[in-house]
Amino acid sequence: MTKKAVIGLVAFIFLTGLIFRIAGLGLRPMHHDEANQALKFGALLEKGEYRYDPQEHHGPVLYYLTLPVAWMAGAETTAELTETVLRLVPAVLGAGLILLLLLMAGGLGREAMIFAGAALALSPFMIYFSRFYIQETPFVFFTAAWIASGWRFFKHPSAGWAALAGIAAGAAYAAKETSLIVFGAAFLSIIALYFWEKKTGRKEKSGSWRYPAKASFPGPKKTAVGVAVFLATAAATAWLFFSSFGTNPAGLLDSVRAIGIYAGRGLEGGSHAHPFWFYFKMLAFPGGRGPGLWSEAFILALAVAGAIGAFHHDSSRQGDSVFKRFILFYTLTAALMFSAIPYKTPWNAMPFYLGVILLAGSGAELIWSVSPHRPIKAGLLVLILPGFINLGLQSYRANFKYHASVSNPYVYAQTSNDYLKLVTLIENVTAESPEGRNTLIVVAAPADRTWPLPWSLRKFTRVGYWERFDLVPAEARQAGIIITPPGPWPFEDDASHIDSYFELRPGILLCAYVRNDLWNEYLERRNPGK
Amino acid sequence: MIFKKTLPSAVAAILAMSLLASAPAPTLQQEEKEVLKIELPKPMFVGTPRNIRTPNLEPVTGRMRGQFYVPAGTILLSREKAVISSDLEPVIGELSFVTDGEKSGEDGYFVELGPAVQWVQIDLGESQALQAIVIWHYHGQARVYRDVVVQVSDDKDFITGVTTVFNNDHDNSAGLGAGRDKEYIETNEGKLIDPRGIKARHVRLYSAGNTSNDMNHYVEVEVFGLPGK
């Protein structure tokens, strides 16, 4: 394959991945977690201040990366933000992963890189969570960046690559503290790789399964300098972000404290405790209802081929089997570690699924390189291509049709589409009312039934939040709109309000009570003279 | 003086007479009426698992509906009666499910009609005094059906002599007029509507999607009345 062809294919794959990630970003209702992050960012946007909270919200990288996007969109307040502006950051970084593969081309091989890029561009799982305003995609992007830079250092030791790897690693840590799991998995993989290569590498033999290529580790001096540069730049980057660029010097220490907090939460699991095989089942056999096949078994099967191929050295094959073995060790270790932690949410699979995709690229290349003859290659393409097409079809369904439906295996505690009708009702009822955006709105619901209302009601100036309706002061009970979970009629007058129900999440309802005067005005505007 | 002495007695007498006049009324009514017996399906609200792929189901108010009294002799009129619909080809199930007596909230017991405003209509065979209409849209999950409107008429086309007995389409989005009845969450109890003895042969029930999706469902509709009256 010529260099031009490779560049053309990578550009096409990148554009495909980008379109899947940025099209219709406002379509899916804000998830509970996204709304939390959005308001946290809103505070940074409005006040220019950020202070790391070791208890919640993870690291600040997502917020700082969103700032320039919000400025470019002309947003100066939370009220001026939109879902699209916020989600653009993870969406572009998600597509950026495809470009990062270029740095790994020497390790994976050009053709494996193209297959891996196609899998990244089309994977419904990776696309779905690249469209989420949460820390996961920035975290995975910077993880890929430091692995790629680290690989470049391994092949061509220089302070530049070590520094790039360090900056990316620091940013990964400042995106999400759980990056320590990934660092641990990578460290263990390097140790395992070292001993593996030491044992088998002396008898390198092309075409052999038993004695694959020998790794050539950088010398002790270069390694020491590289590690020192890596650690220094990583620490400096992490400190810059966690300290809010020097304004909160204790931020980095707080992030270390947070590790204990998140470790406790992770081991406890709570309402997000899931069995060991949760991620594997979600990706391979999610079951569920709805039309079409939901499964990324195609990528997993190719990854198995890639894993086997990592132990085969053939000088005629592209790439470096040492890199492939590192990716295999890393993927297995990270997958085991994430699966062993009781606390699981679907997006936590992203860091190791990136490794699965790299292996899948290598597996596809292994199959592709079975024969150099064009007719056979054409036949192989016919075998592989439907798998990729099916991934694309799944991505369309997952992101543009069933983005909030329980039939979508990646939907997790997702706000229902019906919730948008509640927001529309509030907007419509208050639109031309005398008080407009100053209409008093009362939300009387426990925390798990409140979000994403604070995001959706960000343009209203008088919104009060209580845990239960009986805690709402008497004067606030006269609010124009009251939102509560379903229950007995809360007002003395049986006909004082109009009630409407909306689904917050599947099976979880919210009831909106609109005061009669507001409702009648709205009805008059809607159906004049009737 | 006589007036002063007799006034309290007169007031007491008037009060006593009014109490006597009003007290026998419910007694008489109760003598003529009986509790409507509705066979309820098994409740489907079983716990609140956190896994979102098993819907989080919730109790609604925690209280059962009180007893509903109907004139003695009231019977179920709608069982196995003919059903027609605005959706000529239901997405799932058969229109006959609406009156087949099966009220389970599980899959396989409901008919699914397309999105937007849809109706089903039951032909009772002859005009009769209707005493109760009970509707089960779908009670396998906590959800609310929108724009529920129930009309009765002797005209099968619902052009003349149409009476609306229930309407919670608050904003008139279904175009049948704005209603003030309250929305409600589906449960295994069904929604009981009181048609107040109005005589009609046809019962038409509208809805326009629900909080969970845009489709319209019916597990069962039961119409109770006095036959031949």
Image (cartoon, coloured by chain):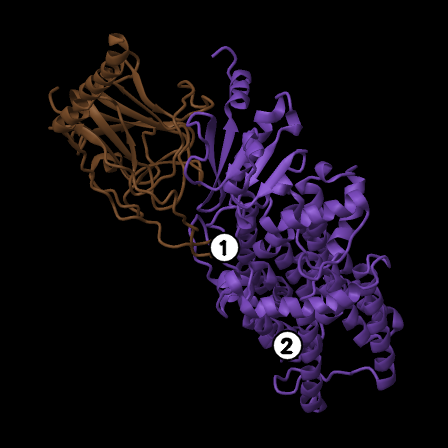
Name the amino acid type tagged 2: Phe
Q: Secondary structure at mark 2?
A: helix
Q: Please identify the quarter of the rendering in which residue A105 is found.
A: bottom right
Whether residue A233 sits left or right of residue A280 in the image: it is: right
Q: Nearer the viewer, residue B162 or A389?
A: B162
| Chain painted in purple in the figure | A
Q: Is residue B229 above or below residue A492?
A: above
* Nearer-N-terminus badge (1/2): 2
Name the amino acid type tagged 1: Pro
Instruction: Give me the disc on residue A92.
Output: none
Q: Secondary structure at mark 1?
A: loop
Residue A144 image offset from top left, x and y in percent: 72, 64
Q: Is residue A105 visible?
A: no
Disc 2: host chain:
A
Residue A438 image offset from top left, x and y in percent: 66, 29
Q: Colour of chain B?
A: brown
Disc 1: host chain:
A
Q: Please identify the quarter of the rendering in which residue A425 is found.
A: top right
Q: Residue at x 56, y 28 (%)?
A: A480
Whether residue A29 sits left or right of residue B87 in the image: it is: right
Label 1 CA crowd tier, 10 Å (few <14, some 14–19, many 20+)? many
Discs 1 and 2 lie in a common subunit: yes
Q: Which residue is mark 1?
A: A409
Label 2 CA crowd tier, 10 Å (few <14, some 14–19, many 20+)? many
Whether residue A61 sits left or right of residue A366 in the image: it is: right
Q: Which residue is mark 2?
A: A329
Q: Nearer the viewer, residue A528 or B62?
A: B62
